[in-house]
Image (tube, coloured by chain):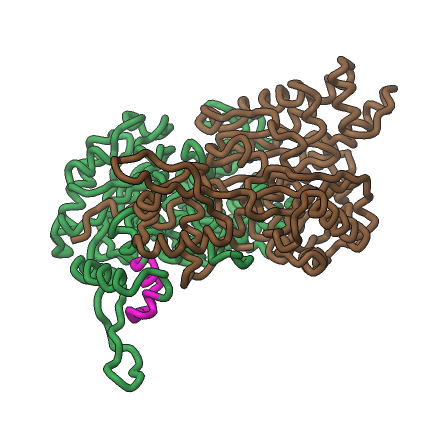
Chain colours: A brown, B green
Amino acid sequence: MRESGPSPTGPTAGTALLLRLVRDGRPRTRAELAAESGLARSTVAERLDTLLDSGLLCHTDKGPSTGGRPPSLYAFNPGARVVLAADIGATHLTAALTDLSGEVLAEENVSLDVAAGPDVVLEELCRLGGALLDRADRARGDLMGIGIGLPGPVEHRSGRPTNPPIMPGWDGFDVPGFVGGRLGAVTLVDNDVNIMALGEHRAHWAEAEHMIYVKVATGIGSGLIAGGRLHRGSQGVAGDMGHVRLPHGAELPCRCGNVGCLEAVAGGSALARRLTEMGSPVRTSGEVAALARGGSVAALTLVRQAGRDIGEVLATAVSFFNPSVIVIGGALSLAGEHLIAGVREVVYQRSLPLATRDLRIVQSRAGERAGIHGAALMVVEHALGPAHAESPVPEGLPVPIR
Amino acid sequence: MRESGPSPTGPTAGTALLLRLVRDGRPRTRAELAAESGLARSTVAERLDTLLDSGLLCHTDKGPSTGGRPPSLYAFNPGARVVLAADIGATHLTAALTDLSGEVLAEENVSLDVAAGPDVVLEELCRLGGALLDRADRARGDLMGIGIGLPGPVEHRSGRPTNPPIMPGWDGFDVPGFVGGRLGAVTLVDNDVNIMALGEHRAHWAEAEHMIYVKVATGIGSGLIAGGRLHRGSQGVAGDMGHVRLPHGAELPCRCGNVGCLEAVAGGSALARRLTEMGSPVRTSGEVAALARGGSVAALTLVRQAGRDIGEVLATAVSFFNPSVIVIGGALSLAGEHLIAGVREVVYQRSLPLATRDLRIVQSRAGERAGIHGAALMVVEHALGPAHAESPVPEGLPVPIR
């Protein structure tokens, strides 16, 4: 879904611009809004009325008095509308109602196999959506939109999954048509790692222009933030790293059909299988992480080596992409510092020195909240533009116009 | 250098917006400009006067008559100002005067060792700049700016080279201060591969949102276009791929001090050395390419294998970045289809199938012109914004404002 398009006409142009300005959280006077937007004062006045009527803006405390009547301040009202955000995993469905800042108002979590197919899973999502609206005492008409993360490749433009390996029956399914049709709201769909990257970035690393978020769980995938925006790539599959071939992993078969993929060597399933073979029967990434946290030498050794393997693939990505932050999330990242230590060991050694000079490699701060937060903000930013927007036009000509 | 900043105030905002619109090459009426920009008609009229005065806009043929007097059409005038564009390589300096569409008006090419140091090289550039202005009969005041590509890492924000390996004396040198001070114009500096990527994209692949341009010559580097913009990364070193370690290259020492780098295995110098050892004495990438074009089996075999090695590193980049086009340029790409065939062989086999579904891997079309064209457009787009600009504000709210 392109966040940009033909030049706007009519009243929405100024409206969107004013909204972007106040979404940084600082209330402003009418005069400030005119100065910062470059819009005529009369236009600003007109647009402010529209926005106050819509509820998206509200009056707040008066500004400082300059002798006469203190000027009114206008602020963004995140409670004006709500978003239904959903994070669908292999075996769970989390749905939350959030306000326009991504704050959760109500939430539901159910165990559900994504392989049950789109009808079952999305019907359940719609049911939960209705229940959450009721619980939060909001009308369906209050929905600004619905954001959904799915555990597989998604063509973001159409909202349809594309050959998702663990989602039988979902290939090409019209998710926005189904959910949007039932709940009557714009529906955006993306890969789960992309929404986690967006959520983690907006909540904790908004100042970082370029970031890589890596989810290490059963599978391994990443989401890229380039210039503050989610970089989805041409087919919407940017950030794939689980199926990059490792030189020393040649013999291990991967669920994708190839051999030696990073995921087959360092993913949570691979580690669980090896621990089981070594006499510590575990099944999931979370159990592997728990074993490592508990001090199991076998688990610690495997997790550290998984970090090194992931670091080997990330080293190439760092040289190409030159991010300032790499965030490691997902169930296996809960193993403590061991996973990240392995990643750091290899990335700092292998990547171009200039590219790692100021590079931070850190554990996810948003944790499990990243997905829901990102799904909600995907909708809000689609509707209102990013909060810390780039200047809509160049800052001015650096050379005088003669 | 950030191409964006705080919100604009005053007249430049509307001016820049109108300029962006007409830079797609289609002349427009005043009414069309008002509709497309969302600016008030009175504002449009005022800004158009400023732009006509500046020469950046001009009147052109009348529009279709609708009965009364046919309306005036306004068009971008690329001849209003000029740009000095320079492509500095290891042993050459190309300088050109271009118009605002990047079209070359006059050009000079001299042999010059970049290792002679910044004073010698940049003094020569300034001399050439003056001579080119004279030859094209343009005044210094006509310079919109100066764009320079250097064969090493550059901190684009400051225009200073950062530890450039083949440029002794250049580390941290204030290139914009020196050149801009002498010629009296804004000076932007970037890595040579970045300006080639920009030039190639703007001239031939402008419709591709995400592109990787690979320069294969003595060294191997790449430039990334993400969402239509040059992706420079946090330290400005994005696109490095020459120093990614190849699994089978462990024994070969690289000029960077490490061993097994892609450049040490597949760069033009490495191939020339091996051909020389095999009894075909050659020195440069160009000579290697000529030998391959001439049908030398040894050269063809080496070039094809170099393509595979490059493909191995690109396969990871393709999975991460998901471009729609990979362009292969540089002196070694003149070896014909053999280099690209090797790249394709590995990338199509190794990358995620979805990421290669619509991926094109092609030879550079701009060839040697890419650098000069990119250096010129770097300056023009910095001053006026990209020609095919994204919408300055979201296209409107996808849900009605209530």
Residue A395 in view here = yes
Residue B206 appears in which quarter of the rendering?
bottom left
Q: Residue furthest bottom?
A: B67
Residue B402 at x, y percent in the picture:
53, 57
> Residue drawn 18% across and 57% down?
B54
**Which quadrant does the N terminus of chain B fall into?**
top left
Q: Quadrant of residue B51?
A: bottom left
Describe residue A21's horizontal placement relative to residue B308 as left or right.
left
In the figure, A45 relative to A280: above or below? below
Q: Is residue B337 visible?
A: no
Residue A131 covered by magenta stretch: no
- Tell me which residue sits at (32%, 38%) in the image: A70
Expressed as whole percent of the image width and height from the top left, the position of residue A100 reads 56, 43
Q: Is residue B145 above or below residue B91?
A: below
Compared across the picture, whether B361 is left or right of A60 comes to: right
Closest to the observer: A294 or B314? A294
Is B31 one of the magenta-colored residues? yes
- Position of B395 compared to B348: left or right? left
Question: Looking at the picture, how far across and down is residue B294, in whole percent?
Answer: 46, 53
The magenta segment is: B18-34
All told, the count of numbered labels is: 0
Give the residue at x 39% y 41%.
Answer: A73
Would residue A242 appear left or right of B83 to someone viewing this image? right
Considering depth in this image, is B366 or A273 the residue closer to the camera?
A: A273
- Who's the residue at 26% across and 84% down the image? B68
**Along the line of sight, which residue is nearer the eye, A245 or A4?**
A4
Picture coordinates of residue B384 (x, y %)? 30, 52
